[in-house]
Image (cartoon, rainbow, N blue to C red):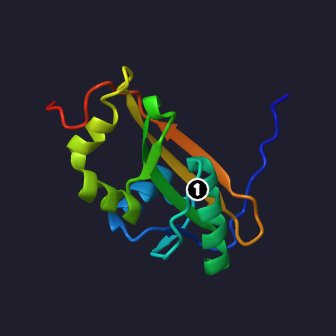
Amino acid sequence: MAAARAAVVVPQPVTFVTGNAKKLEEVKAIIGNSIPFNSLKLNLPELQGEPEDISKEKARLAALQVNGPVLVEDTCLCFNALKGLPGFDFSGPYIKWFLEKLDHEGLNNLLMAYDDKSAYALCLFSFSLGPGAEPLTFLGKTPERTRTLCEDE
């Protein structure tokens, strides 16, 4: 006997929280036409903490602002020697400021004292049906790389 699968009915289009039209195109290409999407750029706070907790909280906050279903995306860079830190959100203002101050060489210098130079990118999507709904989070992680960040291909 086949296991029954629960279907989730989304009562209105899902708002993908982004100011990047290319990201919306990519999400639509992956998901197809089964779920209607629109996009909206929201000014959400730059939260601090574990990437999954940040993604879920951003979905909660976005659902409150939109008053409906939302999808948020975060991509961050994590260094194993620093126990997953800094967890930079590539789309947020914090990483832009950090890289302006430190640049790629500075990031490499952070790791000079450690034998483990490996890093990985973590991509998170959190979906909320709306205000008060617990977000579902999906994670993707790249294979770890041991090169220095500014090393040529």
- How many numbered marks, from 0 up? 1
Q: x, y (%) of residue 7?
A: 75, 53
Quadrant containing the N terminus in the rendered view: top right
> Does residue 61 sit above or below 34 in this rendering?
below
Look at label 1 and name its amino acid: Ser
Q: Which residue is mark 1?
A: 55
- Front one among 81 and 134: 81
Which residue does the image show at 50% across and 53% down from the upper left?
Answer: 31
Residue 63: horizontal and vertical position, in percent?
65, 72
Q: Residue furthest top?
A: 115
Residue 91 shows in this picture: no
Judged left or right of residue 32, residue 57 is right
Question: Above or below — where is 70 with respect to 143?
Answer: below
Q: Residue furthest right?
A: 1
Residue at image point 39% right, 71% down = 19
Label 1 secondary element: helix
In the depicted structure, whether residue 23 falls above or below residue 30: below
Q: Quadrant of the C terminus?
A: top left
Q: Position of residue 28 (x, y in %)?
A: 44, 58
Residue 55 placement (x, y as % from top left): 58, 56
Number of other residues with Cα within 10 Å of mark 1, as a class: few under 14, some 14 to 19, many 20 or more: many
Which residue is rendered at x = 36% and y = 67% of the image?
20
Q: Is residue 147 above or below residue 123?
A: above
In this rendered view, identify the residue nearer to me: 96 or 13.
Answer: 96
As rendered, which of 106 and 146 lies closer to the eye?
106
Nearest the viewer among 113 and 37 is: 113
